[in-house]
Image (cartoon, helix red, strand yellow):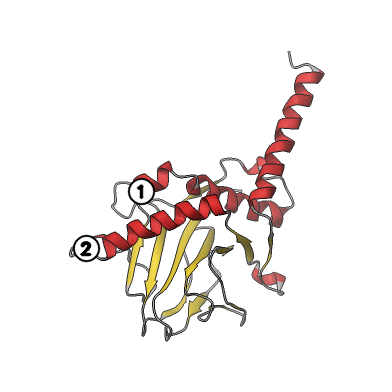
Amino acid sequence: MITSKMKSDLEGLNNFDEQFIESLFAPCQLADINEETKIFKTVIPDIIWDELLQLTLEAKKVKSHPLSQLKCHYNAGKNSYQISVNQRLFEESFLYPYIIFAGQKYLSMMQDVSCHSLTRKVGIRQYTGHYDGYDFWFNFSEIGDVNPPHRHAGSLSSVIYISNTQNLPTIFEGGFEYNGISKEMLIFPSNLQHQVAENTIGERITASFNLESNA
């Protein structure tokens, strides 16, 4: 039998969880003044950012390997090299649940519900049994590269700005442009078309992931 004290304790735990999630994604706000595009931005916490940088270094090791093309992540982008996140390291990281909670946070803001109510309703897209594994990849763009207008698969997608990104904006349909800086992350509907103009500034590194939701 659940007593009133047990119920109070459980409610307190849920409140604590919500506060913790709120702290992870503060600030989290509309990136675009036009609410129709539904683009949200947040700043990745330092401890999560350090994990992402380690995964970036692992991606660079593969990029410099003579057999790097065997692990190339193919999608709509026209970057010099794209590679999926290291599956083992990703699964061991706190970054993994962080990006799932990022999806829950986005939906909670859009639907005006708690993150807790969206538990297990958001997950990262996967290719089971494939070296590409998770639909989470790094983009290495060099001078002359271009990312033409495209949409992503899934329900929600993201751009994470890692290095040398502030002078080459992400351009979304409707004319909104965002000059992201290191540690910033955008989340938006996967069907929102976007692009990046020709690279004229040198190596630009970003990461992207696609989430699926049944919420």
Image point 52% across, 81% down: which residue? 167
**Vertical placement of residue 12 versus 154, above or below:** above
Pick the front one: 179 or 170: 179
Label 1: state its secondary structure.
helix
Q: Nearer the viewer, residue 181 or 79?
A: 181
Q: Nearer the viewer, mark 1 or mark 2?
A: 2
Residue drawn at 52 percent across, 61 percent down: 157
CA gap between label 1 and label 2 equals 18 Å
Which residue corresponds to the image point at 69% horizontal and 71% vertical from the top-left? Answer: 36
Classed neighbour count for the residue bearing mark 1: other residues with Cα under 10 Å, few (<14), some (14–19), many (≥20)? some
User: Does residue 135 show up?
Assistant: no
Which residue is found at the position 59% from the left and 52% from the top? 102
**Horizontal arrangement in the rendering, residue 80 relative to residue 35 (left or right):** left
> Is the residue 57 above or below the residue 81 in the image?
above
Q: Residue furthest top?
A: 1
Residue type, mark 1 in image: Gln
1 and 2 marks in contact (CB < 8 Å)? no
Task: Indicate the position of residue 197 as horizontal and vertical percent values.
Answer: 47, 84
Screen quadrant of the N terminus: top right
**Front-most of 87 and 192?**
87
Q: Which amino acid, by three-letter code, is at mark 2?
A: His
Residue 140: image x %, image y %?
Answer: 37, 71
Would residue 185 be found to the left or right of residue 60 on screen? right
Q: Secondary structure at mark 2?
A: loop
Say few, some or many: other residues with alpha carbon within 10 Å of mark 2 (under 14 / 14 to 19 / 20 or more): few
Q: Relative to residue 72, is residue 20 drawn left or right?
A: right
Q: How many numbered marks appear?
A: 2
Q: Which residue is mark 2?
A: 65
> Which disc, if any, is residue 105?
none
Name, please, the residue furthest toward the right: 4
Mark 1, residue position? 87
**In the rendering, at what x and y percent does residue 136 appear?**
42, 57
